[in-house]
Image (cartoon, helix red, strand yellow):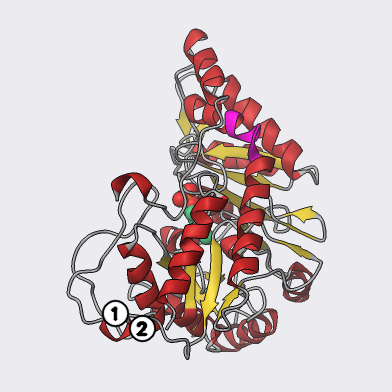
Amino acid sequence: MADNRILLRMCRMSGHEMRFIEEAFEGEWVVPLGPNVKGFEEDLERFLGEGRHVVALSSGTAAIHLGLLGLGVKEGDEVMVQSMTFSASVNPVRYVGAIPVMVDSEPSTWNIDPELLDHAIEDRVRITGKKPKAIIAVCLYGMPADYDRVMEVAEKWDIPVLEDAAEAFGSSYRERRCGTFGHFGALSFNGNKMITTSGGGALVCPDGESARKAMYYATQARLGYAYYQHEEVGYNYRMSNISAGIGRGQMIVAEEYIAHHRHRQEYYRKHLAEIAGIKLHDNPDSRFDSNFWLCTALIDPDLKVKGQDKAYSSAITSTVGGAGGVTGQGESIHTDCEPNANVEGLRLGLAAEGIESRPLWKPMHRQPVFSGFPSYVNGVSESLFHRGICLPSGPYVTDEDADRVIRTIRSLIQ
Ligand SMILES: *Cc1c(COP(=O)(O)O)cnc(C)c1O
């Protein structure tokens, strides 16, 4: 089984990375900063357009943290954040001592519900007497948020948006790239994202001045004296020149990878179409152009899957391990908010055939670490979490692999 496992999403090197890394070694640039960092930032600026300035960082989480600092978010401030997301969207809110206010999703994009956001802001102003300091909108699994409506609410209240586009590299909305809609945008180049630098991220900034400021905080808030003067707390968040070399090599194939992800989603959609209870996620209309970073689908609660009765009875969670996988071995811990039994049955059935799948992100308002903070809930994110599954995607997953996934799913449907 070890040799023909199909993992959820693995990054693939293009073959161009070593050239940039060798250049770094030859020029003694095995340091943070250096020509690859500059080159990668310029590649990203060209890719994103809109005159944005990009600062390459050690992670996407660091980018969100610096974005919040750039927006002046301080201890005790409230930040509106999409509940249906990965924890890295919310953790930085706590790093600055601010209070995350979780907002539920809309069913079409799975992203922040603009009407609920509007209502929630109004309610926060009524309760606390002041406006939230920022809105974190996420493009989940690559699907753009409905920016026309999100920005309308943001402008109505005059609250800046920080766009978490960590999963949306190459996605666009009205032909404009995700990451360029908010005042700041955050990108991630972690090992499982659309392109990788082995670990890294970037802050997309509206102008040179805010980029310089982000760079200053990312390099220990060091002022330009020979003896290093520090007047503020800083961070060590810059990307290394070696990582950036990987990024430059990945940029050469980025469009190819993005096209492959879109093809993969369409392929699953076409070949699973005859199963009534499985629905692949799709762009709500022509304004949206998701990169389909992970191939996601919703499973009807009435769909019967073999083994679903035993899905939650086994003490050990069956997993497919390996790099790029996040499911660990060990006891499955039962909580009061879990995927439906047929989704878990499907996951276990696929795992038994060496195919890794995963439930959707569990909403932040249901995570013990954040459940004590305010939330505005409409049931959508919990319903998505109960019904959703991520199927293998990425440059390594071939049509033949997808055929095996599809065959296995068919065999598991009763
Ligand atoms: C991956 C991810 C991040 C964080 O990026 P890292 O580079 O892993 O720190 C933030 N938000 C979302 C939605 C992500 O998926």
Image location of residue 96, percent across then percent down:
45, 59
Residue shown at the point (69%, 42%) measured from the top left: 255
The residue to which callout 1 is attached is 311
Label 1: which secondary element: loop
Q: Are marks 1 and 2 in contact (CB under 8 Å)?
A: yes
Please state which amino acid type lies under the numbered disc 1: Ala
**Residue 208 visible in image:** no
Residue depicted at x 61% and y 53%: 261
Asked which secondary structure carries label 2, the reply is: helix
Query: In the figure, is residue 71 to the left or right of 200?
Result: right
Numbered tag placed on residue 5 in the rendering: none
Q: Is residue 32 left or right of residue 172?
A: left
The residue at which mark 2 appears reads as: 341
Count of labels shown?
A: 2
Taking depth in this image into account, of 143 and 235 the one nearest to the observer is 143
Q: Nearer the viewer, residue 240 or 330?
A: 330
The amino acid type, in three-letter code, at marker 2 is Ala
Relative to 61, is 198 above or below?
above
Q: Which residues are magenta?
A: 249-254
Residue 329 point in image, percent of width and height: 22, 60
Considering the whole magenta stretch, tell me its main secondary structure: helix
Q: Quadrant of residue 176?
A: bottom right
